[in-house]
Amino acid sequence: MNFANFINVYRVNEIKKRLNQENLSKYTLKALSEQCGFSSKTTFYRVFKNVTGMTPLEYCKKMNLVIKEN
């Protein structure tokens, strides 16, 4: 694993941790991704899917989390 992949895995894990801890009604996926260092929604979705095997919305549904998409 190269450094960029390491950072992306760390960022995705941080987002997953925040999704499970925070009051999600005040955040959007875009806001959470920006807080964790992703500069674009497209990159965030691509990296999240590469790391977890599912999109952020699929992950939220699987974990029974309700969050705004944008």
Image (cartoon, rainbow, N blue to C red):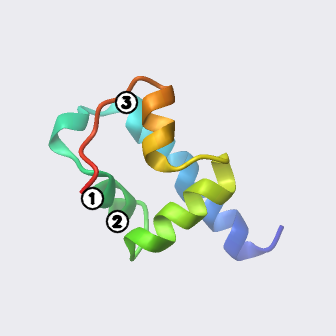
Q: Kindly indicate whether the residue at mark 2 contacts the one at mark 1 (C-beta within 8 angstroms).
A: yes
Which tag, 1 or 3, sits closer to the chain's start?
3
Is 14 placed left or right of 50 in the picture?
Answer: left
Is 22 placed left or right of 26 in the picture?
Answer: right
Which amino acid, by three-letter code, is at mark 1? Ala
**Pick the front one: 13 or 41:** 41
Q: Is residue 57 above or below residue 41?
A: above
Q: CA distance from mark 1 to mark 3?
A: 15 Å
Q: Secondary structure at mark 1?
A: helix
Label 3 crowd bin: few (<14), some (14–19), many (20+), radius 10 Å: few
Which residue is painted at 40% across and 40% down in the image?
Answer: 18
Which x, y percent locates residue 6?
A: 71, 64
Which x, y percent locates residue 10?
A: 61, 56
Q: CA distance from mark 1 to mark 2?
A: 5 Å
Which x, y percent locates residue 43?
A: 50, 72
Task: Check residue 64 in the rendering and tell me which mark sits there, or answer none.
Answer: none
Which tag, 3 or 2, sits closer to the chain's start?
3
Q: Secondary structure at mark 3?
A: helix
Which residue is painted at 16% across and 42% down in the image?
Answer: 26
Is 60 placed left or right of 68 in the picture?
Answer: right
Q: Secondary structure at mark 2?
A: helix
Which amino acid, by three-letter code, is at mark 3? Gln
Instruction: Report the residue marked by disc 1.
Output: 31
**Pick the front one: 16 or 70:** 70
Q: CA distance from mark 3 to mark 2?
A: 17 Å
Which x, y percent locates residue 41?
A: 39, 69
Pick the quarter of the image with the N terminus: bottom right
Instruction: Report the residue marked by disc 3.
Output: 21
Q: Kindly indicate whether the residue at mark 3 contacts the one at mark 1 (C-beta within 8 angstroms).
A: no
Which residue is painted at 43% across and 31% down in the image?
Answer: 61
Label 1 crowd bin: few (<14), some (14–19), many (20+), radius 10 Å: some
Instruction: Report the residue marked by disc 2.
Output: 34
